[in-house]
Image (cartoon, rainbow, N blue to C red):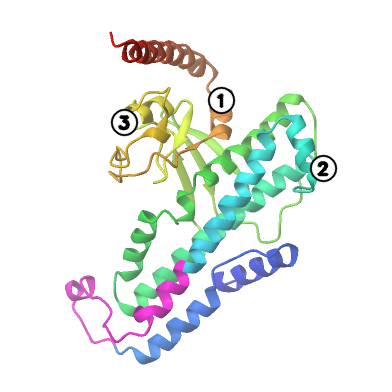
């Protein structure tokens, strides 16, 4: 089955359950077909093809294709982030908070299997839309013999609307593993929920490559998502992990150090000129997301390392707290 038909059937099935945004794959392909008829490419050498950009007269580049795709991407990422955050907040909430949520009617009561399936559905939604966007941009570049599609992809990554950059995708993958593992540890045997007809993946896994942890998810469309869980500052497994708005993951204390703030004030007080140590993008600290599900997963999977790191971090935090309050007292008394 061609991906376009598979995608349309998947989205149609989802819209029957709930109204959710998607990429207008078929509509965008029709735009490209019209452009193909109007576009008359000349014969070029390989070097000329690499540097070739679409002509100014191309109606696709003049405000049809890219604005349409950008709007759809914003809708998809916004819907995904909102619903993933709600699900994870419900899962991590206390029993009293969950009861209040159910009584208010903001969420239907879900059992263990229901939570697993909803998390899996959200990951499926993110991945199939990521594949759709990748394929339509690749088709655009092929028709126009250009690199405009790749340039657009780079641009939306800087705008932070690339769905694979979302911290909630990482959290959902960890959430999916945590629920399955917690059931195994409890000793209960529960039948797996039936896989959806258009499922893109069988599940997520935490793997170790030469001792370095990776959060992996394989797609049926020959695409693999690997999230590196090694902090690029301390070069160790992330502890108390946090995701910056650019998508890079660090230990919380390492991120505070990179942002030139202490753990008492936190990342919300970071200056907007402070940059991510990896991509050098500024203004990425204030909207950082604490990855609580990933924290739980790594704590369960790396017990010895976690306990050792916890002791070290506790001593460092106490030292920073002491220095902070000593400074505050001296400032207040004028000593």
Find the distance from the CA under tag 2 to the CA under tag 1. 35 Å
Q: Which residue is drawn at 31% across and 64% down?
A: 151
Q: Where is residue 126 in the image (x, y as percent from the top left)?
A: 56, 55
* N-term mark: 1 or 3: 3
**In terms of secondary structure, where does tag 2 sit?**
helix
Looking at the rendered image, the quarter that the C terminus falls into is: top left
Residue 287 shown left or right of residue 147 in the figure = right
Residue 198: give its label: none
**In terms of secondary structure, where does tag 1 sit?**
helix
Looking at the rendered image, the quarter that the N terminus falls into is: bottom right
Give the magenta part as a residue range.
41-70
Q: Which residue is drawn at 45% across and 41% down?
A: 227
In the picture as drawn, the residue positioned furthest to the front comes out as 333
Q: Which residue is drawn at 40% across and 73% down?
A: 66
Choose between 80 and 114: the one closer to the eye.
Answer: 80
Q: Which residue is drawn at 66% across and 33% down?
A: 92
Residue 278 shown left or right of residue 169 in the figure = left
Choose between 279 and 45: the one closer to the eye.
Answer: 279
**In terms of secondary structure, where does tag 3 sit?**
helix
Residue 258: give its label: 3
- Eyeballing the image, is 330 above or below 25? above
Q: Residues within 10 Å of mark 3 (few under 14, many from 20)?
A: some
**Viewer-nearest of discs 1 and 3:** 3
Determine which residue is flagged by label 2: 103
Choose between 256 and 219: the one closer to the eye.
Answer: 256
Residue 301: give its label: 1
289 magenta-colored: no
Q: In which quarter of the image is residue 252?
A: top left
Q: Do callouts 2 and 1 mark residues in contact (Cβ within 8 Å)?
A: no
Q: In which quarter of the image is residue 37?
A: bottom left
């Amino acid at each position: 089955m061609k991906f376009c038909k598979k995608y349309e059937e998947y989205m149609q099935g989802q819209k029957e359950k709930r109204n959710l945004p998607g990429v207008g794959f078929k509509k965008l392909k029709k735009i490209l077909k019209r452009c193909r008829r109007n576009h008359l490419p000349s014969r070029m050498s390989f070097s000329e093809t690499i540097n070739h950009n679409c002509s100014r007269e191309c109606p696709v580049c003049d405000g049809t294709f890219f604005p349409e795709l950008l709007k759809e991407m914003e809708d998809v990422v916004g819907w995904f982030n909102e619903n993933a955050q709600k699900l994870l907040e419900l899962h991590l909430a206390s029993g009293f908070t969950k009861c209040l949520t159910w009584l208010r009617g903001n969420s239907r009561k879900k059992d263990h299997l229901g939570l697993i399936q909803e998390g899996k559905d959200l990951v499926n939604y993110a991945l199939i839309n990521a594949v759709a966007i990748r394929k339509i941009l690749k088709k655009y570049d092929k028709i126009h013999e250009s690199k405009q599609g790749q340039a657009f992809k780079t641009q939306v990554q800087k705008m932070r609307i690339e769905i694979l950059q979302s911290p909630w995708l990482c959290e959902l993958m960890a959430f999916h593993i945590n629920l399955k593992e917690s059931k195994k540890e409890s000793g209960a045997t529960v039948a797996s929920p039936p896989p959806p007809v258009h499922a893109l993946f069988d599940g997520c896994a935490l793997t170790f490559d030469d001792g370095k942890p990776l959060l992996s998810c394989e797609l049926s469309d020959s695409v693999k998502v690997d999230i590196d869980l090694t902090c690029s500052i301390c070069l160790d497994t992330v502890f108390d992990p946090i995701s910056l708005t650019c998508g890079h993951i660090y230990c919380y204390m390492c991120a505070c150090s990179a942002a030139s703030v202490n753990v008492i004030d936190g990342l919300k007080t970071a200056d907007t000129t402070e940059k991510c140590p990896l991509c050098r993008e500024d203004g990425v600290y204030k909207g950082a997301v604490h990855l609580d599900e990933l924290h739980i997963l790594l704590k369960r999977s790396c017990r010895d390392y976690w306990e050792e790191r916890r002791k070290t971090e506790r001593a460092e935090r106490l030292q920073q707290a002491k220095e902070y309050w000593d400074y505050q007292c001296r400032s207040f008394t004028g000593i």
